[in-house]
Amino acid sequence: MAAASSCGSESNEANSKWLDAHYDPMANLYTFSSCIALADLHGDGEYKLVVGDLGMAGHTMRLKVYRGTGLASESTLLDLPSAVSTFLMDQNEPRTPAVAVASGPFVYVYKNLRPYFKFTLPPLDANPLEQDVWEQAKEDMIDPLTLKEMLEGIREKAEIPLSVRSVRFLAQDVPEMENFVNLHKGQPIKRQTVITCMSTLKKNMADEDAVSCLVIGTESADVLILDPEAFTILAKMTLPSVPAFLDVMGQFDVEYRVMVACRDGSIYILRRESKRPKYCIKLSAQPVGLVRVHKNIVAGCSDETLQGYTQKGKKLWTVYLPAPLMTMSLLDQKSRGFQAVMVGLANQVVHMYRDKNLVDVIRTQDVVTSICFGRYGREDNTLIMTTKGGGLIIKILKRTAVFEEKDTSLGPPVAQSIRLSVPKKTRLYVDQTLRERENAVAMHRVFQTDLYRLRLMAARAYVKALESSLAPVTSTLQEPLKMNAVVQGIGPTFKLTLHIQNTSAGRPSINLLVSFLYDQSLYAMKRAFFKAPMLIPGLNYPIETFVECLSDKGISDVIKVFVLREGQSMPLLTAHINMPVSEGLAAA
């Protein structure tokens, strides 16, 4: 049994498109696809793995950097990370990217893996009624129980949410309320939002090493675009709901689109200089992931479906998954221009889809919680996955791997259900149809006559070319030759090069002559007759000569080339060379 299982695993690995490079079930990596990135952090061409680790039960949050299969460095994070991105801030050499970690209301920027800058989201306006209530509590005009009742009333009716202080106060027990009020009543009320998602947008060039801006989605339903150097807000857009996933395309200074999947089960598409969404896509359930494939949008939903849309919101297809969706990411094989969506499922399987077609299935040892594909180390096509139990899986795509598209939907093919765009019948079309019905026999006879005449003319021309050897390829098996000519120069002197090749399997050609026929009043050749060397099969033999144009009227003619066997007048090969007009002589 053991031998049989080992043989089965070896056969599965042989049929797989992936090489198992590394698996560490005890890596203690707890993260999501938004908190994992690949980047050349030191500019040495070796890409590292950057992970925002959530830690165990919300403790020991760290920013970890992996090199190869080992941990290279780690830094402590003060709060749970919501997203990790790498981007180039400037054009300075060496071109080393910075690491941005979104955590709470802050974006921590690391340069050379050292803290460089901390961006804080601007505070929001507090509720005026809430401020008045806390001002009364500060002056001891109301007791804690009255404060609690007033804050609960404000929370139910007010449009502006309560601050974190008021929410924490309402969660306190009655004996602890007075101490909480005395501790915080002297401090001003601040309402701070947090970051929910983050991505990058090229500033003014589409190059891979171009400067990029940070795009941030916040809990206050805003999308902010930050300047890469000064970290000021370049653009602010408002959404109807809280963003959960971001995908960005284009350049900030030219044209860009921001696709945002929100918690209300919709995808909003924002464009340059638009404060509100341009298009809205209503999903069938809450979004679990968002990926852009070329110009289409692919969204994974909590109802175990994968849905494809155009940028304008037109639905293209729906795929029903065999298990709940855990995470999804983009596979971009740039060497072959192949893009697909990788979907991690709850049944320990990763599916790969191109459009609605399932192209590959990867079985894992545990449920996958994050997926990242790209260059790692010095290998271009590397797949990195982390599991629910904290494991790390690294696979490398085989260079011989080819993904075959198979339509997994039941029933007839999709193309059969697409309606043809049939134009309306015009009066001319109806008249033509009636005429064809009445004269069908005569029209068929005319067509057959013209077809036979065309075939006869083509056959006669072919026979004539074979009999007079007018073709550049011989038709006899005794001397299988091939010839082409190249003319170089602008005049009045041209360089004429003939390339002759013996196409036989193993028989050389000997005693061959090359002769030129031309108008001697128009052209002069230094050498118009050659004796070809022995032609070895498979080799290309160049024969060069110079042609001088004698006319200054800007006219040209045809030079004929004959390849003959010594002692025979019938040529084996014939080529007609259309000489160009002598531009040098015309200019003179």
Image (spheres, grey):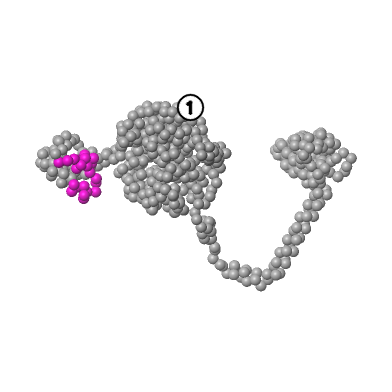
Is residue 205 something one can see in this rendering?
no
The residue depicted at 13 percent of the width and 41 percent of the height is: 144
Give percent across and percent down for residue 102: 35, 36
The residue that label 1 is drawn on is 44
Q: Is residue 486 above or below residue 76?
A: below
Residue at screen point 47% across, 37% down: 383
**Looking at the image, which is closer to me, 521 or 394?**
394
List the single residue furthest toward the left: 141
Instruction: Please identify the quarter of the rendering in which residue 179 is found.
Output: top left
What is the quadrant of the C terminus in the image?
Answer: top right
Residue 194 in the image, given as x and y percentages of width and height? 30, 39
Q: Is residue 59 left or right of residue 150?
A: right
On whether residue 486 falls in the magenta region, the answer is no
- The reply, left or right, for residue 140 in relation to residue 90 is left
Q: Taken as a whole, is the magenta stretch helix, strand or loop? A: helix
Q: Residue furthest front?
A: 1
Count residues near mark 1 (Cα–Cα under 10 Å), then give few for <14, some for 14-19, many for 20+: few
Circle 1 SS class:
loop
Q: Is residue 268 left or right of residue 469?
A: left
Residue 142 seen in this snapshot = yes
On screen, residue 477 above or below 447: above
Percent position of residue 224, x then y: 35, 41
Magenta part of the chain: 152-174
Number of numbered discs overlaid on the protein picture: 1
Corner quadrant of residue 533: top right
Q: Decide which of 226, 352 is in the foreground and name it.
A: 352
Residue at image point 21% right, 40% down:
168
What amino acid does circle 1 point to?
A: Asp
